[in-house]
Image: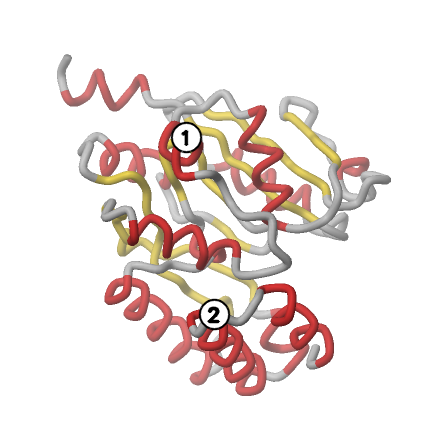
Amino acid sequence: MSRETESNRLRFSIIVPVLNEAEQINSLIEHIRSQSFQRFYEIIVVDGDLQGSTVKVIQDKDLTTITTEKGRGRQMNAGAAVARGEILVFLHADTRLPDNALEKIGRILEDQKYVGGAFDLRIDSGRLFLKYISVRASLRSRLNRIPYGDQAIFIRKDYFEQIGRFREIPLMEDVDLMCRIKKDRKKIYILRDKVMTSARRWESEGAFYTTLKNRILVGLFYLGVSPHKLARYYRRHS
């Protein structure tokens, strides 16, 4: 099978976990549709509100919606369970993909040595400190091969199932998955194209404080502190 033919048969499921995102969910879906992907893809929106407050306002009917108990790991697993695609792309509601994202992912995963990957990060802000955080995050993920969820993690579905999906923990589900991939000695690819993520979290809590808090949480997680204990710390300091 030629390289191009194999690339064209790859199918994608874009899984979007949401909670209280009614104000921006339609603009996110419009963004995905505007990419004009040449490949088969589906969109799966998983609402962590059992009442479906976000999915109820979706105007585009050519997609799949699910409601489940909140928890990003749980929500993404629920989306993966119904996904038809061979490649899963986990997209946060406040993150936007670069142009031709699926084509670029497809070209990378034609190489069977890679099981997944992510993109470089850009925070949507002109503030110098947040530009520094964007560059640092991209360099960090290239060095340690542990991208975070806001970098639009993608992974082969068969490998995702094989490795045990996301752990359904209160936070750090993205870091935990990438640590397990490293432990399994599998390779991921960090694309230099940048996703654009909202600065709202840094702006609402303070850029320096948010960055410091995130570093403390990740450091404690690496030291073996339970994600449930970290979640209590996170709630107290948010």
Residue 116: give x, y in percent of width and height. 32, 42
Residue at point 32% right, 63% down?
141
Q: Residue furthest left?
A: 2
Q: Is residue 60 left or right of residue 212?
A: right
Rendered residue at 39%/25% (across/down)? 86
Along the viewing direction, whichever of 169 and 203 lies nearer the viewer = 169
Sort mark 2 into few (<14), some (14-19) or many (20+) by Cα contacts within 10 Å: few
| Left or right position of 5 against 78 | left
Observer-side mark, 1 or 2, equals 2
Amino acid residing under circle 1:
Lys
Residue type pointed to by label 2: Gly
In which quadrant of the rendered image does the C terminus lie? bottom right
Determine which of the numbered discs, if any, sits on residue 224 in the image.
2
- Answer with mark 1 or mark 2, whichever residue precedes in sequence: 1
Which class describes the residues within 10 Å of circle 1: few (<14), some (14-19), or many (20+)?
many
User: Looking at the image, is 5 positioned above or below residue 190?
Assistant: above
- The label number, if any, that marks residue 157 in the structure image: 1
Instruction: Give me the residue at 51% from left, 84% from top.
Output: 212
